[in-house]
Image (tube, coloured by chain):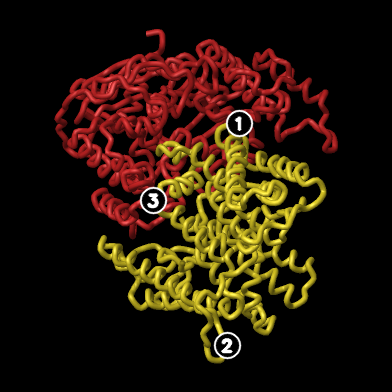
Amino acid sequence: MSSITPADVQVGAKGDGGAPRQPGRVSLGGLSLNLRSSGIYIAFALIIALFSVLTDGALLQPQNISNIIVQNSYVLILAIGMILIIIAGHIDLSVGSVVAVTGALAAVLMVNVGMPWPLALLITLVAGGLIGAWQGYWIAYFGIPAFIVTLAGMLLFRALTLTVLGNQGIGPFPDQVRTLANGFTNGYLGNIGLGPLGGADLFSLLIGLIAIAGMVASQWRTRGARKGYGQSVEPMALFVLKMAAGAALILFLVVQLARFKNLPWVLVLLAVLVLAYSLMANRTVFGRQIYAIGGNLQAAVMSGVKVKSVVFWIFVNMGVLSAIAGVIFAGRLNQAGPTAGNSFELDAIAAAFIGGAAVQGGVGKVVGAITGGLIMAVINNGMSLIGSPSEQVMLVKGAVLLAAVAFDVWTKRRAGASR
Amino acid sequence: MTEHILRMSGITKTFPGVKALQDVNLSVRRGEIHAICGENGAGKSTLMKVLSGVYPHGEYEGEITFEGKRCEFRGIRDSEHAGIVIIHQELALSPQLSIAENIFLGNERAKRGVIDWNRTNYEAGELMKRVGLRENPTTPISDIGVGKQQLVEIAKALSKEVKLLILDEPTAALNDDDSAHLLGLLRGLRDEGITCVIISHKLNEVIAIADAVTIIRDGRTIETLDMATDQVTEDRIISGMVGRALDNRFPPHESTIGDEALRIEDWTVYSPSQPGRKVVDGASLTLRRGEIVGLAGLMGAGRTELAMSVFGRTYGVHISGKIFKDGRPIEIRNVQDAIKHGIAYATEDRKRYGLNLIEDIKRNVSAAGLKGLASRGWVNENEEYRVAEEFHRSMNIKAPSVNSVVGKLSGGNQQKVVLSKWILTEPDVLILDEPTRGIDVGAKYEIYTIINRLADEGKAVLVISSELPELLGLCDRIYTLSEGRITGEVPRQEATQEHLMYLMTKGQER
């Protein structure tokens, strides 16, 4: 779960000496950082630091951290699907409306029909997949630009939502769904005292420790395997430093949450999704093909990538993730409303681009999109804590989005000019 | 008595690592049709780009004098202002706009910013009469054929009061009737006093129309022949174009030829953009294991189109013909099928079709053979690294590591990445389209060595190249392609550049 993979941070001094200096890299002692791919994490840290100071530490209080996660979980889930679509060089403008229509469907099935919630959830997810398949068909097989298809989808599925709901919300949802969307793990193992920090939930802490152990173990194994294949790995000191930083981050998060109401279920879900999708993007043939398509469509075709099928399935995937977000959003509000998901697509797209996706496609990371989403979440939350009016929040978010993409274009142009 | 309208002297133009033009001289007399001949890559188009200001003054060395004045063009606008108009092989027309709108594009007939449509269409009609184009000026460009589009380009040039008209391969995409009309038109323009420079591979046309011909080879001027005084024949031009001696630019190699690997029979492909035009016409060829076979043809002969249509139907429509692999008929519907049947195609356009330039070496190497590095859909990244590192060493790819981004490599090293990518798919047949285009001499030798090694491993290799010495130095057998047809099959022992060039320029009627 470390947010910086080994490829981002490399040792600057390489044996062969004559390697050209790459632009967009800064050297800190012997350590060189690729600004283009790791700038986002530095920016995130700076933004957190800034708002911690501005809010007198209120930003990092247990309850506030918990709020940030729960309030933004659905946008983060959407950002995971969106980054894959953007990497492939497409876009999806319909996710907000799909969130609304799947939330409405879940509400109808669970509340009006009275269906058992697991079955209703399953049907909703399948419906989301079908919506994605519908759009994926027009985009991949019929050849209509995704911008148009999903713009149409944005209207179609909003219309469908209004047809199903009329002008009112449907609720309340079963307790289990509300717990998933809004609830926390129970104190299964009781509390332990943490000295000056007060009592904290033991179960949450254990989960945190397991996560840290898992991270260190998997990174250690990867490192070992790379060494076994004769690849250069980062020096031991740097590895230990990185693991310590990652562990400290997880520990801090978990301790704060354990002091409040334990782990939000959506955080658990989000962690699983991020891990699964990161692995899918980097380590599976399917994930690699997404990057190949976005990087050079023609070359992907000529390399035997089934471009149409890959594009189709990433839209199906987006539909399913939208349905998950739809159920969580409706569950959190405890009713499915006609305006649910308004402008979520913009938040998800902004998260992907702030998180380092390239406008032309081919570049981006799941973790980056999550970080981009969290940057916007922290700006939202921090500015409302210091009492900024909403127009200012919007202004800052707009500026951040523009700055992030401008930075991306700038580093790329510099890279091009030095060739 | 003979006044020169244009003199280019001592033109030298270098691209990173390559000298495209070296001390080129060109003198064109007023009111003549002057042909420029040379092999692909000889520097003809580069020279014309220097002349028309595509490469602005300062990016090249040498002097251009036009109409007695020294010219320092900073862009196409400058050269057009002086009266020089270039018509590129790929026409620069806007397909949805009308003929009249295209003729006056960028040069609109307007009063105070408002377009005067009556004047636009009337003047367009007059210009169209001059070039013999009988169409309504308001017809969209997309509704007329390529031959007529070519005439629109010329009308457009006339609207700019052109003094020197440059045509780059004007008849390459035209059928015989359209070509004849165009050549007649050029003669008419000459009689009106417009000087023409024409770049053409069709030597019979050059003989028929030109008053003088300048031959360029390897970025240098070889000679300028006067049609009236010199005894100019096609053979004379050919020997000027190819007059290069074979030196030891090729690693020695003796092929061990085995069984038939791939046979293509009666392969016909139609153009997707011009309905009814056969790009490949009944071509048949055979490749054997361990053998390096060449495919020679001039620009527009259909070499790449033939290769791509075989490689998973990635070019063309209404493709017909049979393919046999190891003697058995096979069906190739897409690239996946081609890879499955052990066929690989390394494109002539590396940057567009061959590489993902923003990714690193290892991910480009694995792009086509990724399934072989994966189990149940999961890529073994360490194995991927090991394989890439192996190619990094064995192919001598000059890069700090396999994590280097491919877009930053030189042409030769990029080509090695493309070859690695296809070797990883363990093909039996490799089709290499212009494998040494844009590569410096040292790297070429390395690529030749790799090709020889592939043949020694028992693979059948088809090399497509515009450089005849390359084919002669590398191949065991050479096919020639002209206007979509196989016009000859020559064993290495019997092949000479002159003979091949003769076969390559052989017209349909023969």
Which residue lies under the disc numbered 1? B92
* Residue type of the residue flagged with mark 1: Ala
Closer to viewer: mark 3 or mark 1: 3
Give the side of residue A328 with respect to residue A5, left or right.
Answer: right
The residue positioned 54% from the left and 20% from the top of the image is B274
Q: Position of residue A276 (x, y in %)?
A: 47, 57
Question: Tag 1, which chain?
Answer: B
Query: Relative to B262, is B54 above or below?
Result: below
Which residue lies under the disc numbered 3? B363
Query: Relative to B175, is A109 above or below?
Result: below
* Residue type of the residue flagged with mark 2: Gly
Return the mark for residue A251.
none
* Gap in angstroms between the C-alphas marked 3 and 2: 50 Å
Q: Which tint was used for chain B?
A: red
Q: Are marks 3 and 1 in contact (CB under 8 Å)?
A: no
- Can residue B74 be seen here? The reply is no
Closer to viewer: mark 1 or mark 2: 2
Q: Which tint was used for chain A?
A: yellow
* Gap in angstroms between the C-alphas marked 3 and 1: 36 Å
Mark 2 lies on a secondary structure that is loop
Mark 3 lies on a secondary structure that is helix
- Whichever of labels 3 and 1 marks the residue nearer the N terminus, that label is 1
Local packing at callout 2 (Cα closer than 10 Å; few below 14, some 14-19, many 20+) is few
Q: Position of residue B381 (x, y in %)?
A: 34, 55
Return the mark for residue A198.
2
The residue positioned 77% from the left and 50% from the top of the image is A338
Q: Which quadrant would residue A375 be assigned to in this image?
A: bottom right
